[in-house]
Image (tube, grey):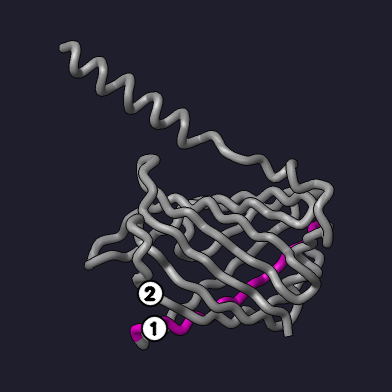
Amino acid sequence: MKSLHFLALGCGLLGLTACTGVSPGIYRAEQPVLDLARYFDGTVDGWGMFQDRSGAVVKRFQVRIDARWETRDGAEVGTLDESFSWSDGTTSRRVWTITRVGPSSYVGRADDVVGEASGEAAGNALRWRYVLALPVDGRTWHVDFDDWMFLIDERVMLNRSVMSKFGFRLGEVTLSFSRR
């Protein structure tokens, strides 16, 4: 019985530590300021890789994003149409609908995102969190993404995402974007 209590305590502590982390607010003074509607307007190209938890590169990819923003019911709404070409020869597509819900906060939806993504911007950074329905070997896993984007200059943005399940780190996605 004691071992069960220790296991429950350990899982509880793991769950608490998985929720902590850096706040986007620490980047508030960083320049240039990231405005999603300004950066993701037109065509943006990206190159990236997925590394498993050991650090091995499992897949590489290129992505082309066709983005546009409009005002709907008084809200700024963006559509990011992402076309991926993977190193194994496959292709995929994700279409995000992103809505600015406050001066520095966003929500988003896509077909393979479970529920709603949430984002907070400050200075040159955006933290974007969501659950992705990820197909793996004939099954679909709901994987947590903790996604950070950092605007380097008016053309270049770097992106680092940590993937996890039940608080356990599964791997990382590293991505660089360049505006045309």
- Whether residue 79 is visible to the viewer of this picture, yes or no, is yes
Q: Residue at x 52, y 58 (%)?
A: 161
Name the amino acid, label 1. Answer: Ser
User: Which residue reaches farthest front?
Assistant: 55
Q: Are marks 1 and 2 in contact (CB under 8 Å)?
A: yes
Q: Is residue 100 magenta?
A: no
Q: Is residue 62 above or below residue 108?
A: below
- Where does label 2 land, which residue? 59
Name the amino acid, label 2. Answer: Lys
* Side (left or right) of 10 relative to 34: left
Q: Which one is earlier in the sequence, the residue at label 1 or at label 2? A: 2
Range of residues picked out in magenta: 75-88
The N terminus lies in quadrant: top left
The C terminus lies in quadrant: bottom right
Q: Quadrant of residue 76?
A: bottom right
Q: Is residue 56 above or below residue 87?
A: above
- Where does label 1 land, which residue? 87
Q: Residue at x 76, y 76 (%)?
A: 155
Q: Quadrant of residue 79?
A: bottom right
